[in-house]
Amino acid sequence: MKDIDFDYGSDQEVSENHSKLLEAVSQLDKGQRVKKPQRSEPSLEVSEFHLVKSGVSENDAVGLQDLAKTLGQKATHADISKKFSATQNRSKVLAKPLEKPAAERIKRVVGFENVKKDLNKWNGIVARNRTAEKLTFPLRQPSMKVDGSTAFIQRFRIQSELEKELAALEPKQEKPEEKEEEFPLTLEEILQRRQETARFRAQQSYKEAKAHRQNKIKSKKFHRIQRKERIKQQLKEFEELQKTNPQAALEKLQQLDQARAQERMSLRHKSTGQWAKNKQVRAKYNKESRQALAQQLSISRELTQKVQKDDNSEDDDEKETVLPSASDKENPWVNGVKTQSEIDDFISGYRKYWNDRNKLEKEKKSPEETPKKIKKSTKQNAKVVPKIKELPNSLNPVEEVIIEDLNNTNHDLENKDSSDSENSPKLQINSVTKPKSSKQKASPQKLSEKLKKGSAQQTNSSSIQQKSVESKIKKKSKTKKPISTAEWSVTPLGSDDTVSKCSPSKIDKIDDIFDAMEDNIENRIEKKLQKIKRKYKAVLSTDEQPSKKKKNSQDEYTGDLGFKKQKRVPIIDERMDETANKTASKATADIVQLKKLAQSKLSSTSNTKNPEIDPSKYINVKPKYMKSQLPDDIAAGDEAIDDNEREEEQQNIISEAFADDDVVDEFRKEKEEEVKKGQPENLDLTLPGWGSWGGKNIKVSSRKKRRFILKFPKDVPRKDENKGDVIILEEKDPKIKEHQVSEVPFPFTSVKDFEASIRAPIGRTFVPENAHKRLIRPAVVTKMGQVIEPMDEDALIKTNTTKVRRRTGANKKRTATKKKRTGK
Amino acid sequence: MEKTENIKYPGKAPVSKEKLEKYGRGEGLNLKKGFSRVKNKIHRQRLRVKERVIENAIEQAARTELLLTEDYGILEKDAGETTTQFKQKQIASNVDITSAAKQFELQLEFGPYCLRYTRNGRYLVLGGKMGHVAAFDWVTKKLSCETNVMESVHDVAWLHIETMFAVAQKEWVYIYDNQGIELHCLKRMNGVTQLEFLPYHFLLASSSRDGHLAWLDVSIGQIISRYNSRLGSISVMTQNPSNAILCVGGSNGVVSMWSPNSQKPLAKMLCHKQAISSCTIHPHGTYMATSCPDRTLKVWDVRQLAGPVHTVVLRSAAQKLCYSQRGLLGAAMGNVVEVYRESEGEMTSYLRHKASWGITGMQFCPYEDVLGITTAKGFASLLVPGSGEANFDALEVNPFQTKSQRREAEVKALLDKLQPELITLDTTTIAEVDIPTLQDKIEAKKKLLHVKPKKIDFKPRKTKAKGKGGTAKVIKTKKILNELARRETAEAMREQKMEESGKKKEELKDYGVLNRFLPKTN
């Protein structure tokens, strides 16, 4: 403002001020701007010849071009315009030459790059020479290869008839000709192709990387978006398809539908819907919603549950005694807690069923459908006696009958008699099972008592149920093992199977045999088991530890045998692992236990501590008895046998006498000592009397042992560790050391590699002569007196001199063809 | 050019994998880029080339089997015949005349004889207990020398050539040349019972009555090692031809293996429960056969020090054993010689011969189908078809050596002489790195300032014995153990049953030392 007040003097002043103002304003407006260099000559005169540029902005200036415009495109002014344009043409001005050192530096850099590039061409040949098996200097030698004499002679030879025929029979192998060097592609083409392939590969790798990256993205949102996009794309395609190819579109639609159905079926969205979400939110506070959710979930579980195809499903309607597995938790039949009335109901039903069944059996009709209640009951029983709840397979009719029969015997003996008289096939079977059943009969009370005890904890142990359990046990025992007066017992597997397999007609004849046999076996096994049991009673009592697996009724039978496992012996029977749920039969379990029993004794003697057991120690080669000729008893010629021989004989006698001296034990002791000697002793840092009483016969406490005895680390196992009766000396300072390599030479950094590299002998006594020569061939051979010149560029050129030579020499035909080719 | 496809056998015939494995030297270097610890590309390439050379050598060796053209003899039996029924006479009458000439007998006077063939099987030296020593070319029956040393002779041994042999006499060991001229008297080898010559090391090894073992380097005339084995009088000693270790059979049934480098046995094997009466090792160093007065004969795997591979109970104890080059096992029992052959994994008797006197020594003649036996009254050469190696390597051992060849071979053998330090149980030890020393070196380097030691993987190449380990083997072992456990259980059951049957075994009463006179059970 001040300026304005003050500067209203002259025109010039005004203009000056004005321009300054403009300038200031413009500066205000747009930051800092570097102005163009301007020339300003101070002059006092004001005329058109004294141009003052300072105040004039660029835009106002009159350019030469503007003046030249007036010339126009007229031909008369062509010359002038040409001249003008010539003046307007800006000629390039050479840059100012660089400073010498800088210029030189650049020169050097460029030179280096160029040389580097240039030298790269040597890489190949240098690498080849460095890795060559053998180099002969001078490197480029004219090939002295001459064709073999046979080939040479062959050219002049006339083949006989026979030879011709032979040749025709098997054409002589011609050496596979070297590939003709043709250049189907020019250098540019090759380069181009290479570039293309490189690009392609790069793109591929990008794509791969991208896909990989995208796959790793965990964001659900991202995937959702992706999916949506995909769906949109599909829809679009579908619409397009609809227009172009309705048939395909239909198919596609079907496919989409199917996919959707599958998606729905998978129940992936069971908890993602709006309803479910809402319920989830409320679930924390609202019981109903929680229930609803749970129900939903249970439904889903039900739906997704794989339908297990029951093997017995076909037989189900025939065999009611087939029990469902208790593991089936979803099964409402099993899960529900039964009330007393229900059970009573069931029992009555059961009774009725049996009566019906017996009647039906008599009529020899196909077994009818079981009421579901019975099934239920059986399930319940299964719960009570889980161990025996399942039969190995569907029962065959014979077994069934046996079961029935047993039931009958338990219920009323008269009934049985009547059935015997009435039913002939049953009778047969009965006769088979008689011995056992009679035995069981002998102690039914005992057994039932036992069972009572076993199921005392269980609910609803009504007598009939007990009986049913009993019957089941018996049935089980029929099929697998008999139950005797002894607490447990085993019959060999399959004895009953064979019976059951037999056709009813045959059974009649065989049953007597089986009778006897079974009796026999039973007696034997019983006795044996009793013996064993008695023998190990002491062991059992000490080792007894009720295992968790056997907390069921079986416990009652085998409880006293449930001793702890002893040392692990390499034999591992998976069957030992059986739990209550498993279907493995009790009999097999018993056998396993028996085995265990036997092993527990054995394992104490055999050294099973060592996990690594040399089988060769145990493989005792059976001695072969050779029928060698017996020597004559030579009545020793007096002079023939001298002192020495007599001595020998004596020695033999002595050694025979001491034959039983335990050399084996001695040797083993020796080995033990040797082993002990080899192993450095543990460092004992215990101070006697420190923190405990001192003196004689005072045991070092285990804590002290643990803390103050430093165990020496075990290093490499001895060579003879698992060799049996062999002692191998582990020398501390073997003399061979001085001949061994104790360093790993340069390119190797692992002992293994180095040892592998020197594994092969090279001596001519070990390998064929040719191989030996090749193995010992010097890496570099120089010709005596020959100047070895450095490689020149010629070395880079691949030469085929040898090939050409061969061609010219051996096969004129081929050269002719070659010539033709070259002529082309 | 079109015909190339029709050619039946393009290129060399392929070599079977088994053959390649037979000549192979085990696993090579793994030079794949990611696996190799050799980082430099050039070096890796170099090693690759070297591997190729080795593989090529193996292949060539496998191909040279083609050159082993000679066939091994065998006694073939007809139906209803056994090979043992053929007498020497019958064999001799049925072979060509040159072979028949190889069956002969010498009746000698001077007491039980011992014998030794040269390595090429051409010459034979006999030593009679009563001082008779004779060396001769047994094929031509040309006598080189025959003397009576006027002392008891305990053993004889050829040195590296057929012009020198050592005789263990009453006091000392003497060396004679083929003229019978005494060259040396080795007084440091006294009371010698057994002699062995280790041809590649030029060592004459001896065992003495007082249990001393001594090794004499015959090329420099120095005793390399001599010490007391503490085994008592050594009467059974043999060498393992593959690793030049002496195997000494002890009176306690233990075969101990000795090298001159250690005063303790490198290995001991408990082979029998009684004194070992004879011990012999297969020329390839694979099997060892031992016998014992309790009439057993056992064959052991001497490479793994395991076994027995075979156990045979003879009808009378074998006093002498010897292996032929082809693996036939000769056993002398009294005056009977039996030759056993392994066929289908079992020892079967192959030949049988009855001498008129008790056999005191025997050896299969190398490169001939001949078994030489000595008795109290002489020497007999028996024909055993298929015992000798038919394909000899004349550069190694030449049965038809001329004098100049012998000289050359002697020089070459001396140049190739192995140092006694290289006598080890495992002959490939020399190709192994001395890892403890290497570790020490590296440790020492670590202690130096400003020195960065190389990172070295110390794991040796040979971590397990050949044929050991591997999943298949492990599974097999498991199976065996399972089977064993099963059997044990069965046994236990049976025992239980036995006990139950009422027989109560009374506790064996302990009589202390007199236990040995109790009747033997089991």
Image (cartoon, coloured by chain):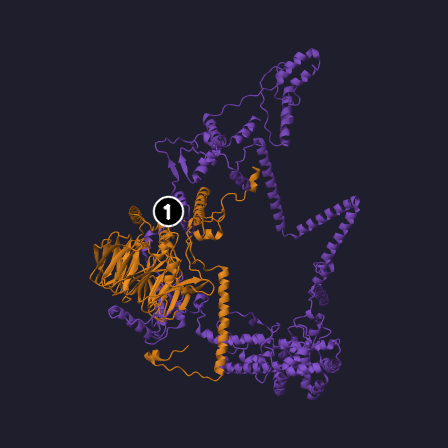
* Residue A305, quarter of the rendered image: bottom right
* Residue A356, quarter of the rendered image: bottom right
Q: Chain of mark 1?
A: A
Amino acid carrying mark 1 in the image:
Arg
Say above or below: A686 vs B33. below
Say above or below: A572 vs A213. below
Q: Work out whether residue A818 can be spotted.
A: yes
Say above or below: B37 vs B192. above
- Residue A381 on image: x %, y %: 67, 78
Left-right relation of A752 to A736: right
Q: Nearer the viewer, residue A104 or A709?
A: A709
- Residue A69 on image: x %, y %: 69, 17
SS at circle 1: loop
Q: Work out whether residue A461 can be spotted.
A: no
Q: Nearer the viewer, residue B418 or A81?
A: B418
- Residue A224 on image: x %, y %: 69, 51
Query: In the rendered image, which residue does mark 1 sit on?
Result: A764
In the orientation shown, which residue stands out farthest toward the bottom?
A414
Q: Colour of chain B?
A: orange
In the orientation shown, which residue stands out farthest toward the front?
B93
- Residue A58 on image: x %, y %: 64, 23
